[in-house]
Amino acid sequence: MKVLVLNGSPRNGNTKAALTAIVQGIEENMQCEVEFFDVAKYKTAPCLGCNTCITNVKNCVTNDDGVVFAQKIADADVVIFGSPVYWWGITAQLKAVIDRMYMQGMENLKKSKKIGIVTVGGAELDDEEYDIISRQFRCIADYLDWQIVINESISAYEKDDLSKDLEKLEYLKKLWKEIA
């Protein structure tokens, strides 16, 4: 099994702590290949919407890390997307990666795949910011016939709030069971 973890946060804070805890649980309890990427450290331009990738060329006109991420998403059995909440949505870095997976074509993306969503925001958990992001991923998953197995919202305002919450980190480590 191939597990791809995409951290959309440009900081080493709560989102990375959450995803790292999940990865620790996976690596301690499952035999699988795990790849973890801080997507903000890579160059992924936004999709140009030119449709060159789905015509005769079958390649993206923008040759950057978005091409690599699109292939990794298509190849993975499980993809875990993590992002802090920026203006009621995911980060631009993660959104660019998601938009660029379009180049894979529906025949490569519409296959059995489990996904996880981890969102970290400064608001309380009953705030609509988490639901807005969750609904976006539900639409993507429904369209591509993917199964959402992790949908975790975390309220953590300061950069290191989550790293101090040992109970929550232990809970996150146990989420590996959802992808097994």
Image: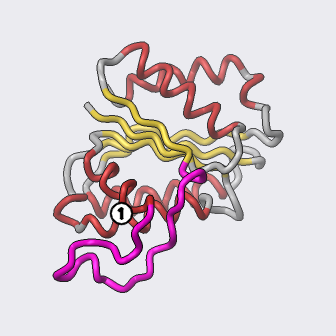
The residue furthest front is 63
Q: Position of residue 42 (x, y in %)?
A: 54, 54
**Mark 1 neighbour density, 10 Å: few (under 14) some (14–19) many (20 or more):** many
Q: Position of residue 69 (x, y in %)?
A: 39, 54
Which sits in the foreground, 103 or 120? 103
Q: Quadrant of residue 169?
A: top right
Q: Position of residue 122 (x, y in %)?
A: 77, 47
Which image quarter is the C terminus in?
top left
Instruction: Return the residue at label 1.
Output: 101
Is 36 magenta? The answer is no
* Whether residue 116 can be seen here: no
Identity of the residue drawn at 67% across and 17% down: 167
Identity of the residue drawn at 35% across and 58% down: 70
The residue under label 1 is which amino acid type? Answer: Met
Which image quarter is the N terminus in?
top left
Residue 103 to residue 161: above or below: below
Q: Which residues are magenta?
A: 39-64
The kind of secondary structure the magenta stretch mainly shows is loop
* Whether residue 29 can be seen here: yes
Identity of the residue drawn at 49% across and 45% down: 6
